[in-house]
Amino acid sequence: MIKNDLYLRALKGETVERPPVWMMRQAGRYLPEFIALRDQYDFFTRCQTPELAAEITVQPIRRFPLDAAILFSDILVVPQAMGIDFKMKESVGPWLDTPIRTMEQVQAIEIPDVNDSLGYVFDAIEITLQKLDNEVPLIGFAGSPWTILCYCVEGKGSKAFDIAKSFCFQHSEAAHLLLQKITDTTIAYLKRKVEKGVSAVQVFDSWGGMLSPEDYQEFSWKYIQQIVDALAPLSHVVVFGKGCWFALEEMAKSKVSALGVDWTITPEMARKLTQNNMTLQGNFDPARLHSNPATIKKMVNEMIHRFGKDRYIANLGHGILPNIPLENAEAFIRAVVDWKEN
Amino acid sequence: MIKNDLYLRALKGETVERPPVWMMRQAGRYLPEFIALRDQYDFFTRCQTPELAAEITVQPIRRFPLDAAILFSDILVVPQAMGIDFKMKESVGPWLDTPIRTMEQVQAIEIPDVNDSLGYVFDAIEITLQKLDNEVPLIGFAGSPWTILCYCVEGKGSKAFDIAKSFCFQHSEAAHLLLQKITDTTIAYLKRKVEKGVSAVQVFDSWGGMLSPEDYQEFSWKYIQQIVDALAPLSHVVVFGKGCWFALEEMAKSKVSALGVDWTITPEMARKLTQNNMTLQGNFDPARLHSNPATIKKMVNEMIHRFGKDRYIANLGHGILPNIPLENAEAFIRAVVDWKEN
């Protein structure tokens, strides 16, 4: 039904002619057609207006031969739906006037009906699927409960999320209650995305790498696993944990279809820690897209060679940077698309 | 000659009664007697006034039963000595009005005579050694060339140092020239510290974990290794690379006396990657000092159990956080000092 199903075949572990390719944050930032829209509408307007979110989602698909689209949205729409009033502050990023720091605040949070509070996302999926016309699969995503807790407690971005971590260590009961509420909302949210027609869901654990291996199990993986268990019977689930190499072995035992890895782990080590039988996604250093196109091509070939063409989805190791020249992004994608077994 | 030589014996790999303990950034931040001084003198005045730097160095030694002192200073005194005019900006941190972004700027940098430009550090060592009266060893330190380049190019702190990385990838000749100039200055600086009487030198590679394993070898480890090769015949050299777990195997082949590790790697994995024959230092999550003292004690015992008492230096996995209660810092230290083999 989907014409280019390379991404889905890689998720199933099938033998493919070449690895599929997409780029985290491919919709946005570095694209001139996105920047034109950004100058007209603020961040959450872009997320919350289905027509805009759908348009932004397909922009990179029109420009580049990508093998998957990912719905333009933000991980913070989930806490917003839970009544946690995130704003996007100019030159600061996500911002919460009253960060969550007490059990009373956590208890006051209600698990929303996602159909009411996140209906705009499901509408965006509908419009996007029309626009995509079955050319490539559409990926839906959510932040991990731990990563969302980080923003809720810290109230903004941070280098090390020490306030969020301290909250977990000092008020662990409140932390677990908050994590569970985020988890329950996220499961309902992702299930509805799947019903609306996304072909896979990806969970982004952007700040899991701030935790020790033991604390990661307790405060992050435990909740991601609930999401995986709930979604895997319905869809492909991919988990990307930035800096979470130490948890790969455990993650590989779950029902995920693939695991994302960042650029600080070698392909060989990532394969080894996942028993050599897992579809892996990654892991080109986004800053390496500042190399010239010829170097990028060489490095991509090397990356495919090291991961192997099967059970592999070529991607960056984190989101594309805002100032990457178009020709460099294209060099990355083309190198995968033009790749030939030799 | 040094009365408590536990730290030095651990560096030599000798059998000890219990592991030695010190804390990265133990001089400063969380100590009331430091805060009193901080309110009187600005950051670089504290670094550049030998009597003040010496006093701050010994403050934690008076308060706690630590097994080593580390000279109060900053990694940025080295680029300052090279004519790169770092300031400390209120609520921003390190700041450079004109970041280094071109080959011309790099070529203009001169390698200083450290005796002229960093004489205040050597004077601080002299005063500190008098104050310490051979009670515990004194550690001298420097930033890794890569970490210092990060600040020079970025011009300030950063979450991912993407500008610094892009500079290396786009202007790699200029990057290598800058790294070599920093390396040459650092070697002269650390050699002079050893002559003045420090018992060990530690190289802090705070931002090495931003690089891929391959780029780490090219832009960071290559230069740290020059420092290790130059210093190891004269003193103990310890390298701490935050997030650099992927380079441990290579690092362990060098002439370092010990390697520092952060809290994202298990003791078992750190031992395995260093062939089980290396003195390791770390790796308590600094945010975990927000747990209550009883939990801290339990976790420290567990940590010692997992690393083993020999070839091990108990420490945090990064610098102590500013808002840690004194009794929690003390609980950490006491747990090591009171540790008994059972």
Image (cartoon, coloured by chain):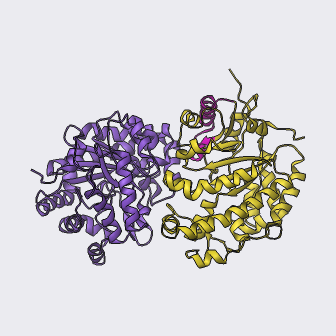
Chain colours: A yellow, B purple
Dominant SS type (magenta): helix
Q: Please, which residue is most extreme toward the top here?
A: A342
Q: Measuring 75% from the left and 28% from the top, which residue is drawn there? A: A15
Q: Which residues are magenta?
A: A282-309
In the image, is B270 to the left or to the right of A311? left
The front one of B249 and B335 is B335
The front one of B203 and B99 is B203
Q: Examine the rendered structure and indicate whether residue A77 appears above or below residue A191.
A: below
In x, y percent, where is residue B250? 40, 35
In x, y percent, where is residue A229? 71, 51
Q: Could you tell me which quadrant the N terminus of chain A lies in?
A: top right
Instruction: Give the total of numbered labels.
Output: 0
Residue A293 included in the magenta stretch of the image:
yes
In x, y percent, where is residue B204? 35, 51
In the image, is A50 to the left or to the right of A243? right
The front one of B192 and A308 is A308
Q: Could you tell me which quadrant the C terminus of chain A lies in?
A: top right
In x, y percent, where is residue A42? 73, 69
Q: Measuring 78% from the left and 46% from the top, which residue is drawn there? A: A63
Q: Please, which residue is most extreme toward the front here?
A: B342
In the image, is A218 to the left or to the right of B322? right
Residue A231 included in the magenta stretch of the image:
no
Q: Measuring 18% from the left and 51% from the top, which residue is drawn there? A: B198
Q: Is residue B282 among the parts visible in the rendering?
A: no
